[in-house]
Amino acid sequence: MTLTEYLISQQEWTHGMLDMFTAGVEEDQWLTPPVSGGNHLWWLLGHLGYNPTGILELCTGKTRQEDPWSPLFSNGTKPHPEGAGYPTPAEIRVESATRWAELADFITTCGDEGLQTALPREIPSAPFLKTYQDAISLYLADRHMHMGQILVLRKIAGLPSPFRG
């Protein structure tokens, strides 16, 4: 498996896991944080959907003009306790697929060799990010971490493990 194939397969895997992990969650549980001020499921879903855009901006230096998701779900934003202004979970899923497709196209266009290209600018808060591959790997690690948070939210809500059929 090439690096390009691996990065795309990891995104596809986490997308499938996200569907599995959020199955059976009732509407009233989408806004329940694990602790006061913690990330609730609705924010996590939006954050995971927004992140491909953030990574593309990091890699290309180009930003989406007036992206309505940025103030809601980008890094450093705080979950709104009532989900005010959030798109519905169904809308988030549709938009997430579009944003992921844009990142997948970028990864595929770069190919294995192009993924070793230096980022267009240094990231002061993350000096270890040097290449496109580094940035995309960080994005995937962030996805995996938030998937763990979703499992914790399931447990707190009293939902069964998604791994038990």
Image (spheres, rainbow, N blue to C red):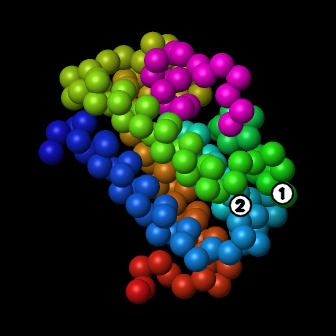
Place of residue 78 in the rendered image (x, y in percent of width and height, measured from the top left)? 77, 46
Q: Secondary structure at mark 1?
A: loop
Looking at this view, name the residue that lies furthest to the left: 1
> Looking at the rendering, which quadrant does residue 133 occupy?
top left
Marker count (numbered): 2
Q: Are the residues flagged by discs 1 and 2 in contact, CB closer than 8 Å? A: yes
Residue 48 in sight? no
User: Which residue is tagged 1?
Assistant: 81
Name the residue rendered at 56%, 42% in the picture. 95
Place of residue 44 in the rendered image (x, y in percent of width and height, measured from the top left)? 63, 54
Per the model, the C-alpha gap separating discs 1 and 2 is 8 Å
| Residue 21 is a magenta residue | no
Residue 98 in sight? yes
Name the residue rendered at 23%, 27% in the picture. 111
Up/down of 123 relative to 44, above or below: above
Query: Mark 2: few, some, or many residues within 10 Å (few <14, many ≥20)?
Result: many
Q: Amino acid at mark 2?
A: His
Question: Which stretch is magenta?
Answer: 53-69
Q: Which mark is residue 40?
A: 2
Q: Secondary structure at mark 2?
A: loop
Place of residue 83 in the rendered image (x, y in percent of width and height, measured from the top left)? 79, 54
Report the quarter where the C terminus lies.
bottom left
Up/down of 45 relative to 100, above or below: below
Place of residue 147 in the rendered image (x, y in percent of width and height, measured from the top left)? 51, 60
Name the residue rendered at 43%, 63% in the picture. 17
Up/down of 144 relative to 102, above or below: below
